[in-house]
């Protein structure tokens, strides 16, 4: 049976994003099957070509993860061909406040919650029964360091990632007895168009390939949490234990007070 150290079949959502495409390439090797999800076939094909050149077998799924019935059909059909060992729930979106007292556009907030949380939970719900039956599998939820403390410029994004973090922590405690591992990944700033569009400072910015290597190497141990980079992860955790007035002051002087 494939181990956490060497999964044979990997399902990855958000495979055309910066972290997603870097993870697909990091995992690509002969004898491994990658099932890559995204919304744009052209972008998926570009990632797939690189992974196939590295020897991996690649299947593509063009799907908007907001389509929950579509997710359920996809996993049901996939399970007839493969037994996924590792499922990385990576698809995500961001939005931010508009300034002058204006919050995030609410249509963007609804989409963000659908993608970052509802779709993630739907995918987990679809893959867990098979993993529990086999008493083997690993689920990875890509959250964010923003899950530790709500950032003033991205409150809805922070809320969605905090919910995903809590969901993953709860799942890990429940599914461990059934042989299923769960890891929550909490990245800091990783260079991408989405990251560059976010307002505010971006300290300790990592490149996607470095983030993918850190995630991939860490997942071999099935840890409860992978967070990076230090010291940003320590600082974000620290915000959650400081007095709220002190934490808010720290964020303001650090440049996170205005979009």
Image (cartoon, rainbow, N blue to C red):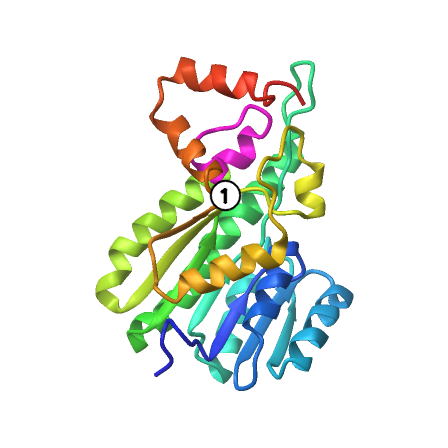
Q: Is residue 59 left or right of residue 159?
A: right
The residue range painted magenta reads: 144-159
Task: Kindly identify the residue that appears in the image at 59 percent across and 18 percent down.
Answer: 257
Query: What residue is pinned by disc 1?
Result: 144
Quadrant where the N terminus sits is bottom left
Secondary structure of the residue carrying numbered label 1: loop
Within 10 Å of the Cα at label 1, are there few (<14), some (14-19), or many (20+) other Cα atoms?
A: many
Q: Quadrant of residue 62?
A: bottom right
Report if residue 224 lies within the magenta region: no
Seen in the picture, residue 201 relative to 206 is either above or below; the reply is above
Determine whether 59 is above or below 47 in the image.
below
Of the pair 99 and 258, the residue shown nearer to us: 258
Closer to the camera in the image, 166 or 122: 166
Instruction: Please name the residue shown 31% across and 66% down the image.
Output: 180
Which residue extends farthest right? Answer: 42
Q: Seen from this angle, which residue lies furthest bottom?
A: 31
Q: Quadrant of the C terminus?
A: top right
Residue displayed at 47% across by 66% down: 87
Q: Please provide percent x and percent y for residue 27.
A: 54, 71
Depth check, front residue: 101 or 107: 101
Q: Is residue 152 magenta?
A: yes
Q: Position of residue 130 (x, y in %)?
A: 37, 73
Q: Is residue 29 left or right of residue 39?
A: left
Q: Position of residue 106 (x, y in %)?
A: 63, 31
Residue 238 placement (x, y as % from top left):
38, 29
């Amino acid at each position: 049976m494939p181990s956490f150290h060497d999964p044979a079949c990997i399902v990855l959502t958000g495979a055309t994003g910066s972290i997603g495409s870097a993870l697909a390439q990091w995992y690509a090797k002969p004898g491994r099957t990658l099932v890559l999800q995204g919304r744009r076939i052209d972008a998926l094909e570009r990632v797939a070509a690189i992974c196939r050149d590295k020897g991996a077998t690649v299947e593509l799924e063009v799907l908007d993860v907001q389509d929950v019935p579509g997710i359920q059909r996809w996993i049901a059909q996939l399970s007839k061909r493969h037994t996924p060992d590792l499922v990385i729930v990576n698809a995500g979106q961001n939005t931010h406040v508009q300034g002058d007292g204006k919050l995030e556009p609410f249509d963007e907030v609804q989409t963000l919650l659908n993608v970052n949380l509802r779709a993630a939970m739907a995918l987990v719900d679809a893959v867990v029964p098979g993993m529990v039956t086999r008493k083997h599998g690993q689920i990875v939820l890509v959250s964010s360091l923003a899950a530790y403390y709500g950032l003033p410029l991205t409150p809805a994004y922070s809320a969605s990632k905090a919910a995903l973090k809590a969901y993953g922590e709860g799942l890990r405690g429940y599914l461990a007895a059934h042989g299923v591992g769960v890891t929550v990944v909490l990245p800091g700033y990783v260079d991408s168009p989405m990251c560059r569009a976010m307002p505010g400072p971006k300290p300790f910015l990592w490149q996607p390939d470095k983030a993918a290597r850190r995630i991939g190497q860490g997942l071999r141990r099935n840890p409860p949490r992978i967070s990076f980079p230090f010291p940003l992860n320590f600082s974000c955790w620290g915000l959650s234990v400081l007095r709220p007035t002190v934490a808010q002051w720290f964020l303001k002087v650090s440049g996170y007070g205005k979009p």
